[in-house]
Image (cartoon, grey):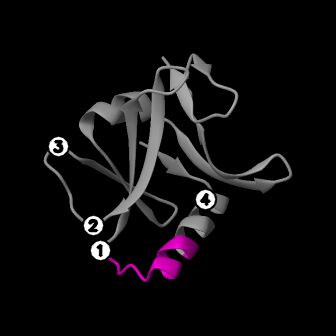
Amino acid sequence: MITVSEKAKNRISKLIEEQHYDDSYFLRVGVDSGGCSGLSYKLDFDNVLKSGDEAFDDNGVRVVTDKRSVLYLFGTELDFTDGLNGKGFTFNNPNASRTCSCGESFSV
């Protein structure tokens, strides 16, 4: 399961509103090969479920990931920061053994 912090929920809701997405849209979270640590996170909005997708609802946000990515993301918290050190979504992933300094890639 992937959890969503209150700050991430608020930012996701704002983005959905700004893009004029209807209730059929959800947050798609995934993992791709690449990045300086080997794997990188992907975030996007989607409204089409694919074969093998795993769906989670947390804190009022519907999160969908493919079967391969869920193995890397299980137990991860999606957060949002808007502090002085940067702004954006962050992943608090207990499965990551190493992350890069920008926080956008990881290895297990």
Q: Earlier in the sequence, mark 4 or mark 3?
A: 4
Residue 106 sits in quarter: top right
Q: Which residue is mark 3?
A: 52
- Give the residue type at disc 3: Gly
Residue 93 seen in the current view? no
Element carrying mark 1 = loop
Compared across the picture, whether 47 is left or right of 17 comes to left
Work out how far the residue at label 4 is from the one at label 2, CA to CA, in angstroms: 19 Å
Element carrying mark 3 = loop
Residue 107 seen in the current view? yes
Residue at image coords 67%, 61%: 7
Report the front residue among 40 and 1: 40
Residue 47 sits in quarter: bottom left
Q: Which mark is residue 47?
A: 2
Work out how far the residue at label 2 is from the one at label 3, CA to CA, in angstroms: 15 Å
- Give the residue type at disc 4: Ala
